[in-house]
Amino acid sequence: MRKNSLPALAAALPVFAFLITAALAETVNWTAIRGARIVPVSGPVIEKGTVLMRNGVIAAVGAQVDVPASAWVIEGNGLTVYPGLIDALSTWALPQPAQAQPAAARGAQPQQPPQQQQQQPQQQQTRSWGPRDRPGTFSWVKAADQLQPGDPRLGQARNAGFTSAAVFPRQGIVAGHGAIINLGGKTAGDMVVAPEAGLYLALRPSGYTGFPSTPMGIMAYFRQLWFDAGHYRQALALYAADPVNIPRPAYDRALEGILGAKRVLLPAADPVQLERMLGLAGDLKTPAVFYGAVRGYEMAARLKETGTPVILNVRWPTRDRDADPEDQDSYRELRIRDLAPTSPAVLSQAGVKWAVSSDGLDSPRAVLRALKQSIDRGLKPEDALRALTLSAAEIYGAADRLGSIEGGKIANLVLADGDLFNDSTRVRMVFIDGVRYLPEPEAPAPQGAPGRGPSHSEEEQ
């Protein structure tokens, strides 16, 4: 019986192989953008070329690319293809603090966002009596566990060309671990590119009283926390080597969160704070990224010397609208306002790796407007684009997946009808993980801020 069945089995094998190959071919989704101007960032501009995507990944890019017959082809005549923009420090897709309600609307207690629910027990501790209380510390919190795909801010970010972001929780002085996410996907899990981006530290106490309450005290607490984490690591290693004779260390979720940090994000708004943070980073012995820099024009030489990347705050300082018109600004204030927009150009000329945060701006599109001011003050457009793409990816160790148009990278792309930094340019569509998103209706622009009219919204595979 077996001898008779062997020829039949051998004859059936090619049929099976054909069926399997056909089934696999049906699951391959090809998309091609053809005849467009392509700005890869990692290489020279291709004036007329093709980007080929396969199952959410860039398969090929160039002036001459073979497009499969089954591919969905988008004609790119008159369009420019950029890598998806990256916000290097954001809270997009994370729960937002509950807004204060008017007295008449306080009939029922509003439901708290998941992040606040998780952190409420720590906040109920009204006073800290020392570092053992772990004041303001949420090092176990992970942004990747709190993502909300329905956040309406995501659509507005995509409208401006943003496809990815480094998002960080902001509660307390040790706020928790950030994540690199894509700004699309049906579930929170679909959005995560890298679940660990670093540990966010702040110098402004929030959610508690008592020690520490000053920048000096907070930095001392950071040093104590890392010292405790080092001791905790040694105790775990000793116990693992001899679990019979060495007492088992008590589990400490705060210290576990410290040990799991790939890098720390430290605030450095000005040269004085930069020097303090450089000393702190050296004591913590953890790779650091500085954020919040406004006076980068004064910090470039020191940043270059130390080789530390910086995330620039592009909310350029301006005079308060409600300021008394008879009050005269100091020369120092006027000088900072004048020179702040030159920071990107000075940092680029010094060879400092820098990226951009949307923190404090009224809309994602305001990031591009702010950088346009810097371009008008000497910043090269290609340096501005790199800061929004490849440099941001490099800072977080994600350049193998994001930041440029190259084969093998995630298919995050922006298709615009002109120069991305021109206010008249419109983003026609973005691709995130190979999925196309069309512009969504714009939220009403704040009074006095330029905006654009609403447009149709659609998401397609």
Image (tube, rainbow, N blue to C red):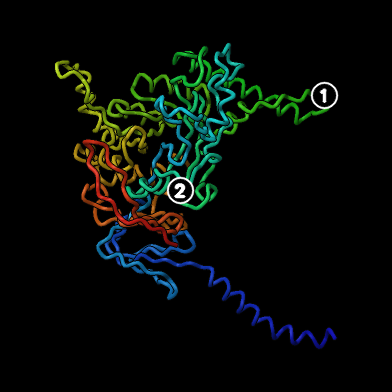
User: Measuring 33% from the left and 23% from the top, which residue is drawn there?
Assistant: 270
Classify residue 8 by image quadrant: bottom right
* Amino acid found under the numbered disc labelled 2: Asn
Specify few, some or many for label 2: CA neighbours under 10 Å numbering under 14, 14-19, or 20 or more. Answer: many
x then y, percent, for residue 366: 28, 40
Which of the numbered marks, if any, corresponds to residue 408?
none
Q: Is residue 302 visible?
A: yes
Q: Which residue is mark 1?
A: 245
Left or right: 328 as drawn, with respect to 67: left
Q: Earlier in the sequence, mark 2 or mark 1?
A: 2
Q: Point out the image quarter for the C terminus.
A: bottom left
Judged from the image, the secondary structure of the residue bearing numbered disc 2 is strand
Residue tagged 2: 182
Amino acid type, callout 1: Asn
What residue do we see at 32% from left, 47% from top? 160
Look at the image and tell me whether residue 262 can be seen. Answer: no
Q: Position of residue 336 (x, y in %)?
A: 24, 24
The x and y percentages for residue 200 are 48, 30
